[in-house]
C-alpha cells in the first residue's frame, strides 16, 4: 500500500490540513486579537468586548480545538493511506 | 495557627511528596533517565508538560503584568499558548517518529553534520541556562520570604531540593513529580480566583466572572475601565503599545515556545506518533486552565487594589485610604521593599493615580494631590498578595506560596534535564567520546546536571539585574535558532547542512546583537549603544519581540544558502520522507 505515489498524496493532504489549521490559528491570534481588535471591540458578549475576549480567552479555546481536530483528522488520514502504527 | 507556621506546613508537606515520588521512580537505564522509557500516557505526559512549562513567570508574574498592562498583556496569554499549536502541528509528531533522545541529535542527523549538532547544543544550553537562572531566583525569593531566611540561603535550599529529585530521578522521576506539582500549582492558582470571582460577581467560574457584572449591575471590565480612567490611567481593555510590536512579540513568544528544548523533549516520551499529536493538546488543556483564569485574576486584583486605596469617588475628601489605617498585607509587602509609599502632599492619605497624564494634572492639582504616592508596586507581588487583598483565609495564602514554589521548581528541573542530556548525550556520546558506556553516560548526565544547578544557583544568587531580559532572551534565542532549523528539517528536503548552520548562526546573531544594543553587551549596565526606548527601536520593535525577526532571517538565510549549495545526500532525503509517516515508529525508537 505504501507506494511512493500514495505517500506523496498522504503528505499533500496533510499539508492542506495544516494550511487550514494554521490559517485559523493566524486569523484568531493576529487578525481578531491584534489587527482588528478595535473593530471587534464594538461588539460585546456579556461584559466582554469581543476583541478583548478573543485576545484573553477565545484564542486559547480555539488553539485547543485546533490541536485535537488536527490530531483526529490525521488519525483518519493515517488509516486511509495505511501509514498508521501497528 | 499563624500564617508562617501554616505556610511552612503546606510547603513542607508538598515537598515530602515530591521527594518521595522522585525516590520511588528512580531511573535505571539511560533511556529512562532521559525520556521515561517512552511509556508515559498522553494525559499524564500532558499534565507533566504543563507543570514543566508553567514557571514562576506564568504563576507569579503573568497575572500581575495583566493587572497593570490590561489588553497589552494578551501577548503573553496568546504567545505562551499559541506556540503549542505550532508544536503539535509542525514538530511533535515528526520528532517522535524520528525517535531519538534530544533536539541536537535530530539536528545533527538531519543535517548530517557534527557542526550543526554542536551549534544546536550551544543554542540549547544558552537558552536553558538563562531560563533556569530566573527560576532559581524565583525559588530563592519564595523560600527566603516563607522561611524567613536571607535570600542566599533561600537559593541554597532550592538548589538542594532540585538536585535531589532531578539528579536522582531523571526524567521518569521528574515526570511523576511534575504531575504532583501540577496538581498543587493549579489548585493553588484557581482556589483564590474562584473565591474572588464569587466575591465580586457571584459567579464561581473566573472565566465567566470576568465577563459578568458586579452587584450594582455594571460589568466588571466596564467598571474597571471607568475606575482607572477616573484616576487618569488609560482604559484597561484598550491597546496602549504599538501594533507591530504587539504582533511580533506574540509571534516571538509562540515560536520560542515551540523551540524551547525542555518542552520539545517531552514529546519524545509518548508511546506513539499519534500520541505526540494529542499530547500537545492535553498539555494545552492543563495550561489553559491557568491561562484563562489569569485574566480574571489580573483584572480583579487590580480592581481590589484600586478600591482599597481609593475607597470612594475621586474628589471626595475622605475617599483616600488613611496610611495609618492600611491593611496588614500592605505593611507586610512594604517590608519586602516591593511596595512603596511616600506621602508627597503630607495629608496622611494615599493617592494612587497617573501623574504622567497631562490632562489629569489640573484635576490632581485642584484636589491638592502632589504626585502618585504609591511610588513602587512591583507587578510580581500581585498574585501572592491577591488573596490577602481580598481578605481570604490564611490556608489559601499558604497554598499560593506552595504553588509558586512548585511552578518554579518543576520548570527548573525540566530545563536542567535538557541541559544534562545536551552535554552527556550530544557532546560526550555524540561527538567527543562515542564509545562511552551507558553507565558512564548516565553519570556524566548527573554531573552535568549538578554543575548546571550550581552555576544557575550562583547566577541566581548574584543576579546581574536582568531577570526579565533573561526570559526574553531565552525565548528570542529559541525562536531565532532552534525552531526554524527543526521546522525546515521536516518540511523542506532541500535544506542542507550549510543552509541550516548559517541559518541558525545568523538568526541567533541578529537577535543577540539587537538585544545587546539596547540592553547592554552581555547585560552589563551602561554598555548599551542606544537607550532602550520605543523611539530608538527599529520600526518600534522592542528587543523582546526581535526573536521573530531573527527567525525570519534564519529561514531566509537557510533557504538562500541551500539553494546555491549541493542538495542533501539521498539517504537524508529518504530519512525526511520516512519521518513524515507514522508507520514504523516503534522500530525507530530502538536505540
Image: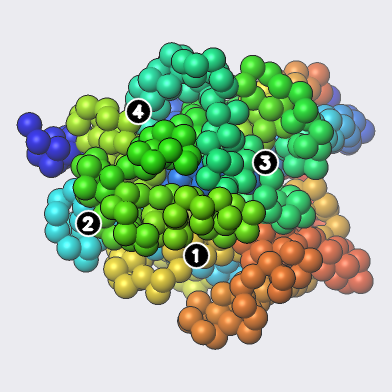
Residue B235 percent across, percent down from the top left: 62, 41
**Residue B238's disc number:** 3
**Residue B335's disc number:** 2
> Would you say residue B111 is visible in this rendering?
no
Spatial CA distance of label 4 from label 3 is: 26 Å
Other-residue count near label 1 (Cα within 10 Å), few / some / many at <14 / 14–19 / ≥20: many
Evaluate if marks 1 and 3 touch, with contact meaning CB atoms under 8 Å apart: no
Spatial CA distance of label 2 from label 1 is: 27 Å
Q: Residue at x 62, y 21 (%)?
A: A47
Which residue bears the numbered disc 1? B470
- Same chain under badges 1 and 4? The reply is yes
State the image quarter where residue B108 is shown.
bottom right
Residue B243 percent across, percent down from the top left: 76, 51
- Same chain under badges 1 and 3? The reply is yes
Residue B369 percent across, percent down from the top left: 44, 55
- Left or right of B423? Residue B584 is right
Instruction: Please report, as a chain letter, where disc 4 is located.
Output: B
State the image quarter where residue B533 is shown.
bottom right
Spatial CA distance of label 1 from label 3 is: 28 Å
Which residue bears the numbered disc 4? B192
Amino acid at each position: 500500500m505504501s507506494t511512493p505515489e500514495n505517500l506523496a498524496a498522504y503528505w499533500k493532504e496533510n499539508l492542506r490540513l495544516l494550511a487550514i489549521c494554521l490559517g485559523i490559528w493566524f486569523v484568531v491570534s493576529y487578525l481578531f486579537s491584534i489587527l482588528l481588535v478595535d473593530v471587534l471591540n464594538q461588539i460585546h458578549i456579556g461584559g466582554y468586548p469581543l476583541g478583548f475576549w478573543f485576545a484573553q480567552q477565545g484564542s486559547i479555546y480555539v488553539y485547543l480545538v485546533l490541536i485535537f481536530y488536527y490530531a483526529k483528522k490525521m488519525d483518519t488520514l493515517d488509516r486511509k493511506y495505511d501509514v498508521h502504527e501497528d | 495557627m499563624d500564617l508562617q507556621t501554616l505556610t511552612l506546613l503546606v510547603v513542607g508537606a508538598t515537598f515530602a511528596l515530591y521527594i518521595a515520588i522522585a525516590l520511588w521512580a528512580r531511573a535505571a537505564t539511560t533511556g529512562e533517565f532521559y525520556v521515561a522509557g517512552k511509556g508515559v500516557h498522553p494525559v499524564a505526559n500532558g499534565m507533566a508538560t504543563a507543570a514543566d512549562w508553567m514557571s514562576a513567570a506564568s504563576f507569579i508574574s503573568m497575572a500581575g503584568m495583566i493587572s497593570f498592562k490590561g489588553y497589552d498583556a494578551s501577548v503573553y496569554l496568546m504567545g505562551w499558548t499559541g506556540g503549542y499549536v505550532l508544536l503539535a502541528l509542525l514538530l511533535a509528531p515528526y520528532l517522535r517518529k524520528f525517535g531519538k533522545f534530544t533536539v541536537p541529535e535530530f539536528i545533527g542527523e538531519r543535517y548530517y553534520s557534527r557542526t550543526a549538532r554542536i551549534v544546536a547544543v550551544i543554542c540549547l544550553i544558552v537558552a536553558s541556562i538563562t531560563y533556569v537562572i530566573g527560576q532559581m531566583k524565583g525559588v530563592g525569593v519564595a523560600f527566603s520570604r516563607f522561611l524567613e531566611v536571607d535570600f542566599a540561603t533561600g537559593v541554597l535550599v532550592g538548589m538542594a531540593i532540585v538536585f535531589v529529585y532531578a539528579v536522582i530521578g531523571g526524567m521518569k522521576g521528574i515526570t511523576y513529580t511534575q504531575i504532583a506539582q501540577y496538581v498543587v500549582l493549579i489548585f493553588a492558582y484557581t482556589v483564590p480566583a474562584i473565591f474572588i470571582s464569587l466575591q465580586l460577581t457571584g459567579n464561581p467560574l473566573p472565566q465567566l466572572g470576568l465577563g459578568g457584572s458586579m452587584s450594582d449591575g455594571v460589568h466588571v471590565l466596564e467598571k474597571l475601565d471607568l475606575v482607572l480612567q477616573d484616576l487618569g490611567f488609560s482604559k484597561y481593555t484598550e491597546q496602549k503599545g504599538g501594533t507591530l510590536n504587539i504582533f511580533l512579540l506574540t509571534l516571538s513568544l509562540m515560536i520560542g515556545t515551540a523551540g524551547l528544548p525542555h518542552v520539545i523533549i517531552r514529546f519524545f516520551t509518548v508511546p506513539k506518533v499519534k500520541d505526540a499529536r494529542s499530547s500537545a493538546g492535553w498539555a494545552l488543556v492543563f495550561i489553559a486552565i491557568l491561562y484563562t483564569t489569569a485574566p480574571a485574576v489580573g483584572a480583579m486584583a487590580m480592581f481590589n487594589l484600586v478600591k482599597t486605596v481609593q475607597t470612594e469617588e475621586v474628589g471626595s475628601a475622605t475617599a483616600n485610604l488613611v496610611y495609618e489605617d492600611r491593611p496588614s498585607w500592605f505593611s507586610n509587602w512594604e517590608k519586602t521593599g516591593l511596595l512603596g509609599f511616600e506621602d508627597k502632599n503630607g495629608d496622611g492619605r494615599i493617592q494612587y493615580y497617573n501623574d504622567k497624564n497631562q490632562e489629569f494634572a489640573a484635576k490632581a492639582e485642584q484636589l491638592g494631590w502632589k504626585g502618585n504616592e504609591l511610588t513602587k508596586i512591583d507587578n510580581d507581588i500581585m498574585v501572592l498578595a491577591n488573596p490577602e487583598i481580598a481578605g481570604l483565609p490564611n490556608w489559601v495564602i499558604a497554598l499560593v506560596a506552595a504553588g509558586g514554589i512548585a511552578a518554579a521548581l518543576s520548570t527548573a528541573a525540566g530545563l536542567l534535564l535538557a541541559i544534562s542530556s545536551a552535554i552527556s548525550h550530544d557532546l560526550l556520546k555524540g561527538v567527543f567520546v562515542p564509545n562511552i558506556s551507558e553507565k558512564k553516560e548516565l553519570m556524566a548526565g548527573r554531573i552535568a546536571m549538578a554543575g548546571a544547578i550550581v552555576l544557575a544557583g550562583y547566577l541566581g544568587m548574584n543576579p546581574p539585574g536582568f531577570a526579565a531580559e533573561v526570559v526574553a532572551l531565552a525565548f528570542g534565542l529559541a525562536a531565532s535558532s532552534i525552531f526554524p532549523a527543526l521546522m525546515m528539517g521536516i518540511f523542506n528536503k532541500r535544506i542542507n547542512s550549510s543552509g541550516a548552520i548559517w541559518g541558525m548562526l545568523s538568526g541567533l546573531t541578529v537577535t543577540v546583537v539587537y538585544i545587546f544594543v539596547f540592553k547592554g553587551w552581555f547585560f552589563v549596565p551602561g554598555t548599551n549603544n542606544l537607550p532602550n526606548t520605543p523611539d530608538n527601536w527599529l520600526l518600534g520593535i522592542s528587543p523582546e519581540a526581535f526573536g521573530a525577526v531573527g527567525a525570519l532571517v534564519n529561514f531566509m538565510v537557510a533557504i538562500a544558502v541551500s539553494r546555491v549549495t549541493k542538495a542533501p545526500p539521498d539517504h537524508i532525503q529518504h530519512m525526511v520522507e520516512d519521518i513524515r509517516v507514522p508507520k514504523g515508529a516503534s522500530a525507530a525508537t530502538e536505540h
